[in-house]
Amino acid sequence: MQLVLDSGRINRNSGRSVPLRSFFLPRRGARVLVTIHAPGLVSIGELQQDIHITPGRDSEVLLFRLKASTPGLHDVTVRAFRGGTFLGEVTCQISVEHGSVTRDGPQHEAPLPSLAFDPGEVTLQVLKDKAAGAYSFQLISETFYAPEVFHFRAGDPSRATEQIYAQLRSAAKAAAGRDAGDAQRLRDRLRNHGVQLWTSVVPQAVQNQFWEEADQVTAFTVLGEHDIVPWELLYPLNEGRQDWGFLAEWLPVVRRVFGQDRVRNISLPGAAFVVPPGSPTDADEEVASLRARLGGRMSDAGVLTDRAALTALIEGGHAGLLHFACHNAFTGAGSCVTMADGPFDPIDLASAAQLRTLRPHRPLVFFNACRSAGEIDWFGESLGWAPQFLNAGAGAFLGTLWPVRSRSAREFAEAFYDQLITRRRPLGLASLFARQTIRDMHGGDPTWLAYAVYGSPAATAQIAA
C-alpha cells in the first residue's frame, strides 16, 4: 500500500502511479494514519500504521500481512486519516482457495482530494466483526490509539436501543403542556439514559482516551456502525471529570457511512421540497417558513408530491437543497413515504446510488420526518435513507432517530438553516447551535437530540451570489 504524491491517491500496492491534480502538503510533510479493516481475516501484525509523506516524492510502501482461516472472498478496506479527520478509503476483495498460489491482483486506488484536516476533530471508528460477534472501537485523533475489541454482554444492543426510542417517542408526544417539574424529570431521565449508554457501550479504555482529548476536541465524528446505539444520546460522565452534558449539546456530533465521499463544500443554488398528500398539518407552514428564510438567494424548484417526479429529480442529478416535510413510516421492513402515486422507500434509490447521480452537485438532503435516519439490515448491509442518499453522492444528510413533534421539527429546521445559510456556520456547528436553540422549548421535548447529521463537520454551504 502506497500514498502517491503526484496523483493524490491511496494505492493498495506499489504499482504504477497515475498523475492527477496535486494537493497542498506542508514543507515538513504530513503524518497520515492508515488503517485496515478485514473481517474474516487474521492480521499478522498491526492493523494500523502511520506514514510520513514528504513533498516531492512518493511515500514508502506499507505492508499489512493477513491470514485467512476460511476460503472464499474477503473484503479489505483501507482508510486514511490525518489527525482525527477522515481523508479517504479504498475497498478491494481478496480471493482465498485451498492450494491456490498467492499473486498480485489489480491495483486499487481512491482519490485524496486534500490532506487538509481540522484541528480538534476526533473520529470514533466502530467496526463490526460478525464472525467474532464483537465490535472494534478506535478513537482517532492527533494521538493514534489502538483499537479496542468489545463484546456486548447482552448480545445485540438493538433491543435496548428500541426500548430507548419507544420512551423518547412517548416523551415527544406528551411534551405539550408539561409543567417545569415534569420537564426537569424528563431531562433527568434522558440524562440517565445517556450516562448508561456511555457506560455500557463505550469501552473503558476509549472513555479514558476521550477524556485525555476532551479539552482539545472541537468536533466528534462517528464512522462505521450507526444503528447499534443512538450516538447523539451519549452522556460522558466519569468520576473526577466535569459534567458537560450530552455529547451532542456541547460538541458537533456527525456521522459518516462506509463509502461516503468527503465533501467540504455543499453547493446550494436552489431548493426543492417534498410534501406528499397526507403530510403533517403544518408541513405547508414549514415549507413557507423555509422559503421566506431562503429568500431570493436560492432558486425554487417547487413542491414535489409524486414519486415519479421525485425519482426523476434524484436520478437526474439534483443540485441544491432537497427538503422533505412529510410522514415516514418505519417498521422492521424499513422506511416508506407514501407519495401521491405510490410508496417511495430506500430501495428506490438503488439506481441513483449505483450510478452516483448526485455526485456532480453534492446536494444537501434534509429528511425532516419521523425516524428518517433508521436503518435495517439488507443482505448484510444497512439499508436506509442516509446510506442510500450518501452513496448516491449527497454532500450531507439530516434525519431523525425517533418520531418527533411537527412543531419542534419545523423549529429545528428553521434554526439549522439560519445557522448554515444566513450565518455561514459549518455543518457541525450549524447542527449544534440548532440543537441548543430548541433544547429548552416545549416542556422537555427531546426532539433536539433526535437529529442525526451525516457529513463533514467542517462542510460549508456555498450560495450563489
Image (cartoon, rainbow, N blue to C red):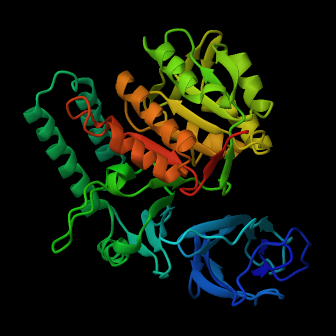
Please name whichever residue, 11 or 150, is drawn nearer the observer in this view of the structure. Answer: 11
Residue at 43% of width from left, 14% of height from top?
Answer: 282
Please name whichever residue, 89 or 361, is drawn nearer the observer in this view of the structure. Answer: 361
Residue at 67% of width from left, 31% of height from top?
Answer: 297
Residue at 50% of width from left, 21% of height from top?
Answer: 289
Please name whichever residue, 410 or 81, is drawn nearer the observer in this view of the structure. Answer: 410
Q: Say which quadrant the N terminus sits in.
A: bottom right
Please indicate whether residue 288 sits to the left or right of residue 90 in the image. left
Residue 463 is situated, as x and y percent measured from the top left of the image, at 68, 40
Eyeballing the image, is 201 above or below 410? Answer: below
Eyeballing the image, is 317 above or below 435? Answer: above
Residue 72 is situated, as x and y percent measured from the top left of the image, at 69, 65
Is residue 24 something that shows in the picture?
A: yes
Is residue 75 something that shows in the picture?
A: no
Residue at 46% of width from left, 62% of height from top?
Answer: 219
Using the rendered view, name the quadrant where residue 115 is placed: bottom right
